[in-house]
Each structure stands twice: as structure tokens, then as C-alpha cells.
Amino acid sequence: MLKIIPDIVSDQTICAMPEAGLAAEAARLMMGFDIGAIVVVDDTGKLTGIVTERDIARRVVAARLDPEKTTVGQIMSRNPDTLAPGDSPLNALELMWVRNFCHLPVVENNRVVGMVSIRDLYEVMKLILEQSVGDAEASLFDDF
């Protein structure tokens, strides 16, 4: 059975900021790393929130706030849902679907060890489906 770590996420750089970090800095980090979300952590490195591109668009830009003065603590989603490294991709996909998320932090021992995106899961689920269809076709033709 596939697991979030190492099958979906491996060798990933985690982009994290403190709550006092600025929204503009978060946006630049996301652009620089070509990612759609960052985690917000406290002084001990414990996850306190998540900020996504959508948060910046809706809670800063659309609200006409100054991104150079607005902190990520003001716009983040607090206490986000998380995944464990041993969770399955299917469970992650289900949680994302039900809660309308595109990103979920992966947490182990109160520390963020990864970030899963809907795109990551799409790629893996597509491969699983293709393999299943191929196996079914091979089985069908074996009967002839």
C-alpha cells in the first residue's frame, strides 16, 4: 500500500514562516519555489497555520490590504487539517475533496515533514488507475 511518505512526498524543501512574516514575503516564497502554499510555524517549529495562494488573493488582494504590512498570522488558516506520513494517498484525496483543500501539511511528532498538493495526488492516482486498467485488460485477454 502506498504511503504519503515516501511514495508521494520525498526530498521536499518545506517553506515555513513565522506568524509575523509578511504576506508579500509569503507570495514571493511561493513564486520562487513554484508552490501554492507555505506553512506557518511558532518559535519551536510547531505548525500553527497554512497560507495558500488563495488566501493571499482573497484575504489580502481582494480585501485591499497592503501585503507589505499584512502578516501571515492575520490571513492564515489556523490549526489546519494534516496528514501523517503513513496515511494513504486515497485518504488524503478524500480529505481534500471533502474539505475543498488543494494542499495539506504532513506532520510527524508535531513537525511539518512535507506538503502534499492535489497535483501530487493526481499524478499518483492516475498511475494507479492506469495500472489497474492495464491489469484488468491483461486478465481479460488471458481468458481468450
Image (spheres, grey):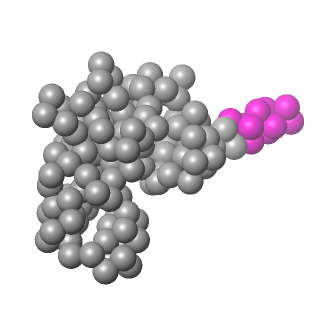
Quadrant in the rendering for residue 111:
top left
At 31% across and 80% down in the image, what residue appears?
A: 64
x then y, percent, for residue 56: 32, 67
51 drawn magenta? no
Front in this rendered view, residue 26 or 5:
26
Q: Is residue 38 above or below residue 140?
A: below
Residue 9 visible in the current orientation = no
Q: Is residue 20 left or right of residue 84?
A: left
At 14% across and 55% down in the image, what residue appears?
A: 21
x then y, percent, for residue 124: 49, 43
Q: Is residue 54 above or below residue 99?
A: below
Q: How many marks?
A: 0
At 21% across and 76% down in the image, what residue appears?
A: 66
Q: Quadrant of the N terminus?
A: top right
x then y, percent, for residue 126: 56, 48
At 27% across and 45% down in the image, what residue appears?
A: 39
Q: Is residue 73 left or right of residue 104?
A: left
142 drawn magenta? yes
- Stretch of the chain drawn in magenta: 135-144
Quadrant in the rendering for residue 10:
top left
